[in-house]
Image (spheres, rainbow, N blue to C red):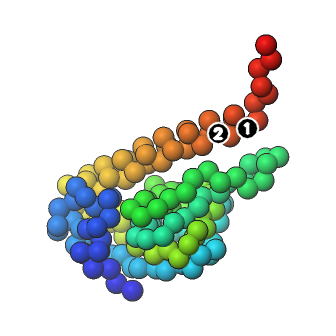
């Protein structure tokens, strides 16, 4: 299903993009819907699309040795999903599962990269927005790691 520029402009990812940039992104995006419990992609498997969550929520889980599947983060509207595809790394680093009925805008990573190369100014804006999203993801992941290590560290004895 095609994406309207007005709908794409509502995403936090697009907040600093020009109207023309939003229009160009929307032109290469498609809308997808995932019912609650649907696996959007699996850790270690190939994925060719960059995604932006429009509504709903996605859980990201990773396999951790001796612990099994561990939830590392939950994402919501406006969040970037499957960013590995953006960097040309098509193997996913986590399993993504819809927590509730979820809508995403999907963009083929190759089309996103071509857009960046064809219009360097827009490409800079897009990569800057992606860097902001990834910086936020890094902070959240660090907080999750603190929780993970807190559960496995022995209590200090006095």
Residue drawn at (73%, 37%), measured in percent from left and top?
151
Q: Position of residue 68 (x, y in %)?
A: 78, 53
Residue 158 relative to residue 10: left or right: right
Task: Looking at this view, name the residue that lies furthest to the top.
Answer: 158
**Along the line of sight, the residue nearer the viewer: 73 or 111:** 73
Q: Position of residue 80 (x, y in %)?
A: 43, 59
- Residue 112 visible: yes
Query: In what element is the residue under mark 1?
Result: helix
Where does the C terminus fall, quadrant-wise? top right
**Along the line of sight, the residue nearer the viewer: 153 or 83:** 153
Residue 2 relative to residue 86: left or right: left
- Distance between the Cα atoms at labels 2 and 1? 6 Å
Query: In what element is the residue under mark 2?
Result: helix
As drawn, the label of residue 151 is 1
Q: Which residue lies under the disc numbered 2?
A: 147
- Relative to 158, is 100 above or below? below
- Relative to 52, is 38 above or below? below
- Relative to 84, is 52 above or below? below
Q: Position of residue 143 (x, y in %)?
A: 56, 39
């Amino acid at each position: 299903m095609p994406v309207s520029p007005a709908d794409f402009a509502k995403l936090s990812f697009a907040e600093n993009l020009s109207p023309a940039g939003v229009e160009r992104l929307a032109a290469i995006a498609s809308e997808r819907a995932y019912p609650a419990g649907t696996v959007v992609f699996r850790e270690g498997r190939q994925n060719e699309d960059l995604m932006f969550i429009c509504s709903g929520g996605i859980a990201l889980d990773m396999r951790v040795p001796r612990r099994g599947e561990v939830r590392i983060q939950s994402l919501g509207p406006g969040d970037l999903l499957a960013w590995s595809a953006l960097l040309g790394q098509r193997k996913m680093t986590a399993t993504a599962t819809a927590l509730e009925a979820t809508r995403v805008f999907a963009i083929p990573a190759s089309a996103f990269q071509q857009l960046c190369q064809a219009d360097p100014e827009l490409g800079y804006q897009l990569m800057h927005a992606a860097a902001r999203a990834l910086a936020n993801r890094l902070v959240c992941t660090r907080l999750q790691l603190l929780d993970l290590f807190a559960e496995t560290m022995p209590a200090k004895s006095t």
